[in-house]
Image (cartoon, rainbow, N blue to C red):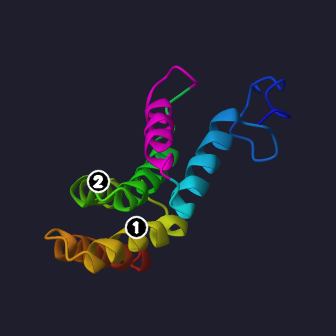
């Protein structure tokens, strides 16, 4: 972080080969979630709030959907399966989740099934429908 803090926010941050502080924060949140770090939940909430607001540039709905899944994973680690399930269902039914992020949803669904959460069956069915819609032509 120390090395990138002096960099300015680029005019076109959505370009993949430019430094983007918002994307950097999202990657950090993802990493914390994968590691099961306790700081993942508040950090992920902050990233999601910034992605959904217009304070740091335009809203980024696809990134926000991925951030919801990261937060859901953090909530599972914090033993908050109800909110994790709600966020995962919202992400899967948003119409914005890209196939390259389906595995994130599957990870949360599996975690809820392992915990025998009541919403696990509904989420598994929503996941099946999501995957089926990805292989069918529109």
53 is higher (above) or lower (below) than 35: above
89 is higher (above) or lower (below) than 12: below
Secondary structure beneath label 2: helix
Secondary structure beneath label 1: helix
Task: Give the Cα distance between marks 2 and 1.
Answer: 10 Å
Name the residue: 47% across, 67% down.
104
Of the two numbered discs 2 and 1 on the same chain, state the one appearing first in sequence: 2
Name the residue: 46% across, 55% down.
70
Residue lying furthest top: 55
Image x and y of residue 37, in percent: 53, 55
Image x and y of residue 45, in percent: 43, 39
Image x and y of residue 128, in percent: 30, 79
Q: Which residue is mark 1?
A: 105
Name the residue: 24% across, 70% down.
123
Question: In the rendered structure, which segment of residues is drawn in magenta?
Answer: 38-57
Q: Which residue is mark 2?
A: 90
């Amino acid at each position: 972080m120390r090395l990138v803090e002096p960099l300015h926010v680029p005019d076109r941050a959505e370009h993949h080969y430019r430094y983007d502080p918002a994307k950097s924060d999202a990657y950090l949140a993802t990493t914390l979630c994968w590691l099961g770090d306790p700081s993942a939940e508040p950090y992920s909430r902050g990233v999601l709030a910034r992605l959904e607001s217009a304070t740091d540039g335009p809203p980024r709905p696809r990134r926000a959907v991925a951030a919801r899944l990261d937060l859901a994973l953090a909530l599972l680690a914090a033993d908050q399966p109800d909110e994790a399930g709600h966020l995962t269902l919202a992400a899967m039914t948003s119409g914005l989740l890209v196939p390259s992020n389906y595995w994130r949803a599957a990870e949360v669904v599996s975690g809820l099934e392992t915990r025998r959460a009541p919403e696990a069956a509904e989420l598994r069915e929503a996941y099946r429908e999501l995957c089926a819609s990805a292989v069918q032509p529109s």
